[in-house]
Amino acid sequence: MRLTEICLALPEATREIKGRHAAFSVRKKTFVYFLDDHHGDGIVSVCARVLPGDNVRLVAANPEKFYLPAYIGPRGWVAMRLDRGDPDWEEVAELVRGSYQAIAPKRRTATKPRPKSLPAIPRCAR
């Protein structure tokens, strides 16, 4: 599935299949859930962590595509429906990457290359 490819392309990402659902984690912290008919709701979706308040804004802006998932919605998560037409996989990837950056250890997400004009700072000087 494309969602698996997107998630597992991120550094240190792992997948745990839980029946019809899956959890994608980095260092034992879940950054994405795949839900298929969660508690009989008939919905197939990807759930991701977003910035505070963005989950409510996304749902308000497009309730046909986004919803607050049970249990984790009030804690800053949003779900994007994958069962309504052909999903925009670039939008899914953007949602996944944002969630990964929010959950992953900061050292993992702060991998900006050092400009070549600046010398590396010796470890003992940091």
Image (cartoon, rainbow, N blue to C red):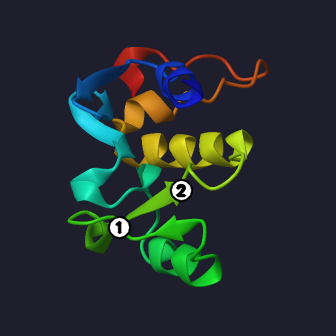
Residue 51 vertical placement versus 53 (above, below)? above
Mark 1: which amino acid? Gly
User: Farthest bottom residue?
Assistant: 60
Figure quadrant of the C terminus: top left
**With respect to residue 74, does 15 lie above or below?**
above
Q: Where residue 47 appears, x then y in whole percent?
A: 41, 52
**Position in image of residue 18 (x %, y %):** 21, 30
Pinpoint residue 67: horizontal percent, then vertical percent.
46, 70
Determine contact: label 1, label 2, CB under 8 Å.
Answer: no
User: Residue 100: which quarter of the image?
Assistant: top left
Q: Which residue is mark 2?
A: 81
| Front one among 123 and 18 | 18
The N terminus lies in which quarter of the figure?
Answer: top right
Residue at (79, 21) in percent of width and height: 117
Q: Nearer the viewer, residue 20 or 76?
A: 20
Label 1: which residue? 76
Marks 1, 2: nearer the viewer = 2
Q: What residue is shown at x 24% (from left), y 37% (from top)? A: 29
Q: Is residue 122 above or below residue 111?
A: above
Task: Judge left or right: residue 81 versus residue 35.
Answer: right
Q: Name the quadrant containing residue 119.
A: top right
Disc 1 to disc 2, C-alpha distance: 17 Å
Amino acid type for the residue under numbered disc 2: Arg
> Callout 2: helix, strand or loop?
strand
The structure residue drawn at horizontal position 42% and vertical position 56%, both measured from the top left corner, is 43
Observer-nearest of 74 and 117 = 74
**Residue 24 in the image: above or below residue 124:** below
Numbered disc total: 2
Q: Earlier in the sequence, mark 1 or mark 2?
A: 1
Mark 1, Cα crowd under 10 Å, few <14 / some 14-19 / many 20+, is: some
